[in-house]
Image (cartoon, rainbow, N blue to C red):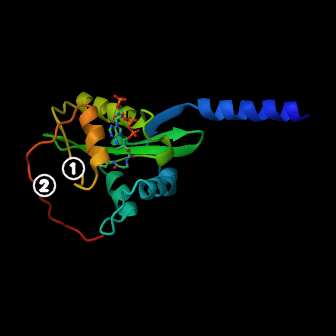
């Protein structure tokens, strides 16, 4: 009996470990899981209401808002945009327990593939200065720190 349980447990573990990861566009039913992931990744900020960010993105190239799903759970996201000059990346996040496993690179590859197909010649993105992990990651996947100063102007308060 113990042996059978052990084998069954082993098989469960194997199935869980081997569960495939799919990358697909965001669907409205993903909202709560996505926001929880952003919180776990420290991507939310008091001045940005994540629900409003999702609603806005659903109106502009929603097919470039991607989630990574594994065994029914959302474990990664990336939001890409293109205004006809530069591609932009926001809300790239991988669930902490899946970081350093290649998923961040996969999400960026898929975002890049879609931007390229739209004719986008260059991707820009912003990283907060207190996030050396993200800078190291982006450099590793081919981005370079550039000298531009980042400015912003709020048009709507969340
Ligand atoms: C940044 C983030 C998305 C990276 O995702 P990830 O799945 O851990 O990254 P990957 O495993 O795909 O790593 C890709 C490459 O970057 C390297 N890398 C990742 N994190 C790194 C780190 N902290 N330091 C050095 N290299 C790093 C990996 O070693 C890998 O290199 P390799 O393919 O040559 O082995 C993830 O750390 C994260 O979600 N962070 C919190 C949210 C965040 O800061 N997002 C960015 C906002 S601008």
Q: Please tell me whether residue 30 is drawn above or below residue 48 in the rendered image.
A: above
Q: Is residue 112 left or right of residue 9?
A: left
Q: Which residue is mark 1?
A: 126
- Quick check: is the Cβ at mark 1 less than 8 Å away from ligand 1? yes
- Quick check: is the Cβ at mark 2 less than 8 Å away from ligand 1? no
Q: Position of residue 93 (x, y in %)?
A: 39, 47
Q: Is residue 11 left or right of residue 110?
A: right
Q: Is residue 127 left or right of residue 32?
A: left
- Name the quadrant of the C terminus: bottom left
Mark 1 neighbour density, 10 Å: few (under 14) some (14–19) many (20 or more) = few
Q: Position of residue 84 (x, y in %)?
A: 15, 40
Mark 2 neighbour density, 10 Å: few (under 14) some (14–19) many (20 or more) = few
Q: Which residue is mark 2?
A: 150
Q: Position of residue 130 (x, y in %)?
A: 26, 56
Q: Secondary structure at mark 2?
A: loop
Report the number of numbered marks.
Answer: 2
**Residue shown at 8%/48% (left/top)?**
148
Q: Quadrant of residue 1?
A: top right
Q: Secondary structure at mark 1?
A: loop
**Residue shown at 66%/31% (left/top)?**
15
Q: Are marks 1 and 2 in contact (CB under 8 Å)?
A: yes
Residue found at the far bottom of this picture: 157
Q: Is residue 29 visible in this depiction of the protein?
A: yes
Q: Is residue 139 left or right of residue 50?
A: left
Question: For the residues marked 1 and 2, what is the alpha-carbon distance in whole angstroms?
Answer: 8 Å
User: Where on the image, by quarter, is ligand 1?
Assistant: top left
Q: Which mark is residue 109?
A: none
Q: Position of residue 63 (x, y in %)?
A: 36, 41
Q: Earlier in the sequence, mark 1 or mark 2?
A: 1
**Residue shown at 37%/58% (left/top)?**
55
Q: Is residue 90 visible in this depiction of the protein?
A: no
């Amino acid at each position: 009996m113990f042996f059978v349980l052990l084998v069954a447990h082993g098989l469960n573990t194997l199935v869980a470990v081997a569960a495939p990861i799919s990358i697909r566009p965001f669907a409205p039913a993903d909202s709560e899981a996505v926001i929880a992931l952003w919180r776990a990744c420290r991507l939310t900020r008091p001045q940005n209401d994540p629900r409003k960010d999702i609603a806005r993105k659903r109106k502009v190239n929603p097919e470039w808002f991607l989630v990574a799903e594994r065994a029914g759970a959302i474990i990664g996201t990336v939001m890409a945009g293109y205004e006809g000059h530069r591609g932009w990346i926001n809300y790239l996040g991988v669930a902490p327990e899946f970081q350093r496993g290649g998923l961040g690179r996969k999400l960026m590859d898929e975002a890049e593939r879609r931007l390229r197909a739209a004719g986008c010649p260059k991707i820009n993105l912003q990283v907060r200065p207190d996030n050396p992990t993200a800078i190291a990651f982006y450099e590793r996947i081919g981005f370079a720190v550039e000298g531009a100063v980042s400015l912003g102007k709020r048009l709507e308060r969340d």
